[in-house]
Image (spheres, coloured by chain):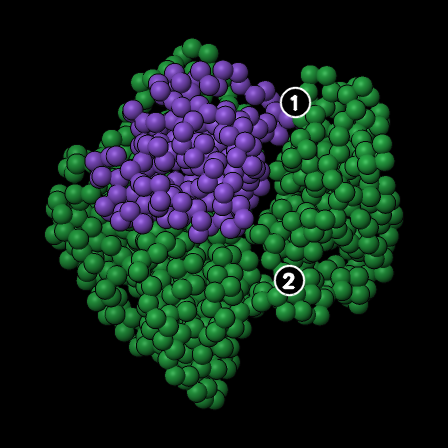
Amino acid sequence: MPTILSGNAAIARGAYEAGVEFAAAYPGTPSTEILEEIAARYKEIYTEWSVNEKVAFEVAFGAALGGRRALAAMKHVGVNVAADALMTAAYTGVNAGMVLVSADDPGMHSSQNEQDNRFLALLAKVPLLEPTDSQEAKDYAIAAFAISEQFDTPVMLRVTTRICHGRSVVTLGERQVPPPRPYVKSAQKYVMIPAYARRRHALLEAERRPALQAYAESFAGNRLQMGDPAMGIVASGVSYQYAREAFPQASFLKLGMSHPLPVALVRQFAASVERLYVVEELEPFLEDQMRALGLAVVGKQVLPRTGELAPEIVQRALAGHGRSVAVGGLRVAEAPAAPAPLVPAPATGSAEQTAAAAPAAAPAELPARPPVLCPGCPHRGLFYVLKKLRATVVGDIGCYTLGVLPPLDAMDTCICMGASIGVAQGLVRATDAKTGKRLVAVLGDSTFIHAGIPSLVNAVYNRARLTVIIADNRTTAMTGQQDHPGTGRTLNGATAPALDFEALARAVGVTSVVTVDPLDLDATERAVRTAADVEGPAVIIARRPCVFVDRQQYKGPVAVDPEACTRCRLCLRLGCPAISLGDQAVVVDSTLCAGCELCADICPQGAFIRPHAREQA
Amino acid sequence: MNENGTTSILFAGVGGQGIVLSSSLLATVCLAAGHDVKQSEVHGMAQRGGSVTSHVRFGSRVYSPTIPQGQADFLVGFELLECARWLDHLAPGGVVLASTQRLDPLPVASGAATYPDGLAEHIRARAPGAHLLDALHLARQAGSVRAVNMAMLGALARHLPFPAATWRESIAARVPPKTLDTNWNAFLAGRDA
């Protein structure tokens, strides 16, 4: 019975059917739902949120060594964190099957970069599978475990946002658990001291690489689809779907396993078509390898190296190159003839295309609709204070990164998970003497646990003069409210010892540790000012639950007294989606307002009516 | 329908309006009717009150999960500004179904930008025969302002060849039982609007 699954749900299903018994991850868009699906639907499988991707990879690796099939899932930048373990796990091998899911985010829908992790598979020398839809996401997940065991290597299953969060039809199968593979002690295989590592590396090159190479040539997911021989397209992942859509009559070499490259198959395909194209998102991963084979290919000289591809991008790029040999499946490319007096904002699509569609008369920009901190978000109070104090704010990865946007406009840097404390330490050392100003590092509770703790130890150790603000909203909010060690609950809802941030900070040697409610603006401002005078690092824990974690924390929406409001716009500096400027007074949308009352706290006219005041009236 | 035999529906609106549920329901109905179907959406930062779209495509064999620019047979706009933003994805002769609801983005609410006038006329000029309906009102009458997505789905259903029973089964499978009547009434109100 076919059903519709997201790519992430299909990977979860594939893991289940493949007999996986252990799965670990740190949440990260677009990978998060893989572990959530496994935890919710397949109770036979042990699941955990690990504190970061490196740990997730390591615990899964350990489970595989112990003889159970294991999966680790993470977003593309998470693999950077796990890379240390990955690079050497490729030498040791894994015993039972181990699959690393790398969920890449071309176009950066919810990421800080769009690195192409296929190169990490190449660097680590592990097999790489790239499904093109949900059915293949499930099938390749199963195949990946078989490959992992057959060749005793971690396998990377690389997906992208359009696979993870695309839904398509999947036929389900049964779960089959292979018998456990006993762990056998072998220091020469698993203890990578240089003498043993040299042997393992040589063995990998001498035996595993050629064996995988031969396997790739016959892997069922690597297949020729011969159409018009005038146009031969090599593609993998969702790019294959875009290319098929654009050129349904062309010949294709579809690569389900793209590392090691099936060289003989590629040569055979190249010899059977007149002109060879490579359609791939981001980097010329396949293209460069094919060029190294001496093949003449058309790829990145016509296709973009940034952002997502789309059928119309592929069609325009390839149709415009050389002879128009294939009949495109698209009827697009011509500008619509109908009047279009409004030009969409550039962020919504190709400015080039929309400009072509617009007539000369009266173009007006459509206002953008950027993501915003939610109504009732406790981060809003913190960033309002930091903006007011004109603090230099070294930011980090999470919902609170939205504090950078106007009108809060209260962030200076954001690089990667946990970077804030280290960057702040360097920045304060380089600039403090000149400006006399103190810097604050702001990072969330989950981010602090993920990669902030070693940096805090470093700051204490090296006597850095900075303020670390842990924006503790009691959850991993941006990815959809996942638990972490600070919440005292596991992925499966079991209770766990809750990490005590205050005690932790003191234990590593921070002498000034203060906890405030970020919606208490006066107390928050006092804490930040006081921390500035502390020698060595000071820690402020700005604690209040995410509005989605505790929906009962507020008393209900505020109202506006239009007589009292002078339209001074001070409340608009909060950047609250529930407040807008009306003709007579500001307006609060009662369906959006969560009731944090920050607006009432800052209004000099007392024009906001608090919910409890309304009840008394 | 394009030359590949694929019908494409683009949903556009604001995070929290129920776009993902609507498009997922539509995909279920397409599958039940025996079609290949693909749907594509985006999570994470993009959902925090920002513009949200979801693509649904069905036919005998669907390739790309996203709708190429200029190929949407239907544009279902849950909000006027968001509907206007995606007009360039509409196919020649494509159908626009738009809720007349207005939700100010933050730059407008804070006075940094203005909400454009004449969006309805703009949409009609680009897509003659565009069907503009007060889905918020229909949903409220049906019992919940949260059923706007069902009213819009109903408006779309009138143009698609799927029986009412299939729609009802799919909706029943996805909403809490005690809200089924409200959701179904909103669907019918949208269909008949």
Disc 1 versus disc 2: distance between alpha carbons? 39 Å
Q: Residue A154 location in percent, x, y?
A: 41, 71
Name the residue type under label 1: Gly
The correct choice, above or below, for A331 with respect to A22 in the image is above
Disc number placed over residue A484 in the picture, else none: 2
Label 2 sits on a secondary structure element that is loop
What shade has chain A been given?
Answer: green
Quadrant location of the N terminus of chain A? bottom left
Q: Give the vertical position of A416 relative to A487 (above or below).
A: above
Residue A120 position in % (x across, y down) = 43, 60
Residue A256 occupies quadrant: bottom left
Q: Image check: A357 left or right of A595?
A: left
Mark 1 sits on what residue?
A: B111
Identify the hue of chain B. purple
Residue A431 % position (x, y): 74, 44
Q: Which residue is drawn at 40% across and 61% down?
A: A11
In the rendered structure, the answer to whether residue A380 lies left or right of residue B60 reads right
Query: Disc 2 marks which amino acid?
Result: His
Element type at mark 1: loop
Q: In this view, does B121 lie above or below B78?
A: above
Q: Is residue B59 above or below residue A499?
A: above
The residue lying toward the viewer, choosing from A471 and A154, is: A471
Q: Nearer the viewer, residue A428 or B82?
A: B82
Q: Describe residue A432's horizontal placement relative to residue A141 as left or right.
A: right
- Give left or right: position of B46 versus B25: right
